[in-house]
Image (spheres, rainbow, N blue to C red):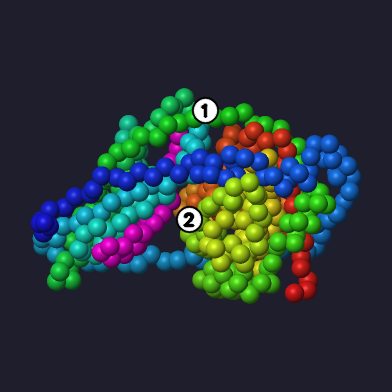
């Protein structure tokens, strides 16, 4: 039975999707094709065989729009004189572990379990030990029965910390049966505690670029002209029309994260699916995500590459020379909020990480890595194989 004056927030549904998400496939076992095609005994020979080198003149850089990607709706006028009641539940997602001396990132989802429409106008996390609030404004309407992702929040993790206790908070208004709005202001969910890991040491990892067997196999899977790839790319990119830009890349990442589910390959076989097959199935493992995202990026005019470790694969997109990366980071933070953005750099410039299996946003940490002072590092891998995607000038 519902009571109109009763308001409460149901106990949290805490979903902790950390790097263990990948243990169903990529991280638990090696990417067999990489191990078979590129063994340590052949690595030296392949280093000398140049199958493909990037042409700096053909690298494409995403535009960083001068305007924000969206505008917040005006908050409804609070004119109701009685509290109509509400019932909501929250869930929290984070894919990477939390490390001392760095920033943690959590996404907050809210489901409206009640009978009244809810309007959320700010959200965040409260660190209970010192009442430190990490939040941002928003404007999200949640109808009865709907569940929506409210957004992502980052928070500082002090050094010499073993755990942090947090509470999610929402500032919200609830519409009455007569159409008026009542402002509940900020309401908090039950607190939850996350364990903090010690920050690892940076590891020196050798890189191998475009070894012939792997390069040819990956290139054979990249299909930016496929109509199904073009269709998905267009749906994502047209939300932010115009020149190839960073908001289009954020949208591509989000749509891939939300619409493609992670599943392992059939037992005893490591398949590298084409983007069309991944889209048809609606699921894939880490290499399928990487191949799909690289194809989507190329489909809207970007420059992509794929990174492969002993146990994982993920895509990256060229973000321009070093003097442009701050503009890219600023645009990403306009889109998602003030989150830490991770990238790597080489002789060509900067490459932005794109790993929906291990991060909730573009520029988040890829799987099998961890933040360190001043950057990030690969963990427990013998080498990193980099595959640059060659432009496909003909369909």
Task: Tell me the distance, in whole angstroms, between the alpha carbons under discs 2 and 1.
Answer: 27 Å
Q: Residues within 10 Å of mark 2 (few under 14, many from 20)?
A: some
Q: Which residues are magenta?
A: 135-157
Q: Position of residue 376 (x, y in %)?
A: 61, 38
Label 2: which residue?
A: 336
Q: Residue at x 49, y 51 (%)?
A: 360
Residue at the image point whose x is 51% and y is 40% from the top:
20
The answer to which quarter of the image holds residue 224 is: bottom right
Q: Quadrant of residue 157?
A: top left
Q: Position of residue 229 (x, y in %)?
A: 62, 69
Q: Is residue 351 visible?
A: no
- Residue drawn at point x = 81 percent, y = 52 percent: 213
Which secondary structure type mostly characterizes the magenta part of the structure?
Answer: strand
Say which residue appears at 62% left-offset and 67% top-offset. Answer: 276
User: What percent of the width, then of the height, locates residue 308?
Assistant: 69, 46
**Where residue 198 is drawn, which disc sits there?**
1
What crowding class fits label 1: few (fewer than 14 Cα within 10 Å), some (14-19), or many (20 or more)? few
Instruction: Determine the secondary structure under disc 2.
Output: helix
Which quadrant would residue 76 be assigned to in this image? Answer: bottom left
Quarter placement of the N terminus: bottom left
């Amino acid at each position: 039975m519902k009571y109109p004056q009763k308001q409460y927030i149901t106990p949290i549904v805490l979903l902790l999707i950390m790097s263990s998400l990948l243990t169903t496939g990529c991280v638990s076992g090696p990417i067999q094709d990489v191990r078979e095609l590129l063994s340590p005994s052949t690595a030296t020979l392949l280093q000398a065989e140049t199958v493909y080198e990037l042409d700096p003149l053909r690298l494409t850089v995403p535009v960083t729009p001068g305007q924000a990607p969206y505008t917040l709706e005006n908050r409804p006028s609070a004119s109701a004189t009685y509290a109509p009641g509400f019932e909501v539940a929250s869930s929290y997602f984070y894919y990477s572990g939390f490390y001392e001396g760095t920033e943690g990132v959590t996404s907050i989802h809210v489901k409206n379990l009640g009978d009244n429409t809810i309007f959320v106008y700010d959200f965040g996390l409260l660190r209970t030990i010192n009442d430190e609030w990490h939040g941002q404004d928003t404007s999200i309407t949640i109808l009865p029965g709907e569940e929506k992702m409210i957004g992502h929040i980052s928070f500082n993790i002090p050094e010499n910390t073993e755990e942090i206790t947090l509470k999610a908070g929402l500032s919200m208004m609830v519409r009455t049966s007569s159409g008026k709005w009542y402002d509940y202001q900020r309401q908090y969910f039950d607190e939850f505690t996350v364990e903090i890991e010690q920050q690892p040491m940076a590891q020196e990892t050798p890189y191998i670029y475009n070894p012939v067997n792997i390069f040819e196999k990956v290139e054979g899977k990249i299909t930016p002209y496929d109509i199904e790839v073009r269709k998905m790319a267009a749906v994502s990119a047209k939300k932010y029309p115009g020149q190839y830009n960073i908001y289009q890349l954020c949208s591509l990442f989000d749509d891939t994260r939300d619409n493609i589910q992670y599943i392992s390959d059939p037992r005893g076989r490591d398949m590298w699916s084409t983007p069309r097959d991944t889209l048809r199935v609606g699921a894939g493992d880490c290499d399928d995500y990487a191949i799909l995202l690289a194809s989507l990026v190329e489909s809207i005019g970007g420059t992509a590459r794929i990174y492969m470790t002993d146990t994982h694969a993920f895509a990256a997109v060229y973000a321009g020379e070093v003097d442009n990366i701050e503009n890219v980071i600023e645009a990403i933070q306009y889109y998602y909020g003030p989150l830490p953005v991770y990238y790597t750099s080489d002789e060509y410039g900067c490459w932005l990480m794109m790993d929906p299996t291990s991060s909730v946003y573009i520029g988040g940490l890829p799987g099998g890595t961890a933040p360190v002072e001043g950057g990030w590092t690969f963990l427990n891998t013998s080498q990193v194989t980099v595959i640059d995607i060659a432009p496909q000038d003909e369909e």
